[in-house]
Image: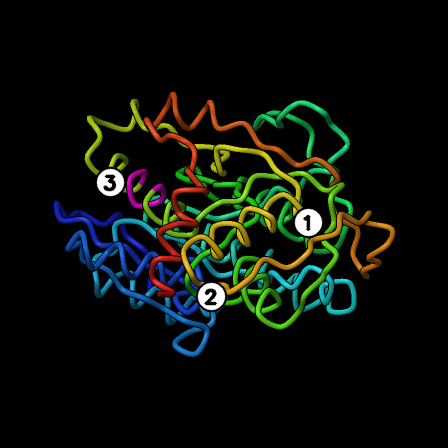
Amino acid sequence: MSGQPIIREEMHLLVTGANGQLGQCLADQLVAQVIPHTLLSRQDADINDTVVLERIIADKAVTAIINAAAYTAVDKAESEPELAQRVNVDGPAALAKLSARFDIPLLHVSTDYVFDGNQQRPYVETDAAVPVGVYGQTKLDGELAIQRHATKYIILRTAWVFGEYGNNFLKTMLRLGKERDTLGVVADQIGCPTYAGDIAKALITIARQLHDGDGEDNAKYGVYHYVGDEAVSWHGFAVAIFAEANRMGVLAKVPIVNAITTEAYPAPAKRPGVSVLSTAKITEDYGLGASKWRVALLCILVSCL
């Protein structure tokens, strides 16, 4: 099947990685906003299976692809580099080629782990990417593959994703808070917690603006950062989670949270030390403010009651 530019006034989004925490938030938002869409999980189709994806794009008259599929097991990536490569590099490359073939935008989610974390000011999109582990390297290689094969792309780097779905730091802390009286949390890694629901809204907003734009000359493609509005350490994030969970009655008592160093909590993969990302560019180009992670935290805790 040879790809042809799709001509359709109605927006129809194809979402890959539909079973992940971001994918499920995207599904919720698309239903709420009554936007035509097709959801693909890993069980539905491999993102490297271009024959299946070509058929879906053509049959559904897809107008943009949102790639929420990713290998995100940071530590396991050190011992499973081939699998991380397949999902984080080969998959985005295949989607980028389809994007070019059908002349539709590809919106792809990347990570702060493309940076080494040695910079004290917030990273902007033009700062040099220097990953410190296999996961970050494969995510960067995925970005480069997209830039090589597609022209209509948005690469959205985000960080410290949490939400109602899947496994994440918030859910781990709530579980440990119920099980333990004391725990240690790393205090020398700094980043911006980001609510998965806000990332989903940002991606859909961008897709809509690209679809409804006045023309290709006004389309703003490229790399963007989208993260939470307040930088904090993992320790600080944990303290905030426990305090609000206790205040709202989700936790009966607040555990003692000891601040520890990264060295005191060894892991197979090295993490960036300070990976704060600037969101100025996405605000200027798309009018999107940073994710208000403390507000999102409260909303999630309310759902736990």
In the picture of the structure, the residue carrying the numbered disc 2 is 47
- Ranked by sequence position, the earlier of labels 1 and 3 is 1
Q: Which mark is residue 167?
A: none
Q: Is residue 54 left or right of residue 256?
A: left
| Of residues 120 and 138, the one drawn nearer to the viewer in this rendering | 120
State which quadrant residue 293 falls in: top left
Q: Residue at x 12, y 45 (%)?
A: 9
Q: Residue 100: tell me if it is visible.
A: no
Is label 2 or label 1 in front?
1
Is label 3 or label 2 in front?
3
Q: Is residue 240 left or right of residue 97?
A: right
* Secondary structure found at label 3: helix
Indicate the amino acid at tag 1. Gly
- Ranked by sequence position, the earlier of labels 2 and 1 is 2
Q: Is residue 50 magenta?
A: no
In the picture of the structure, the residue carrying the numbered disc 3 is 208
In the picture of the structure, the residue carrying the numbered disc 1 is 136
Where is residue 225 shown, x and y percent of the image? 50, 34
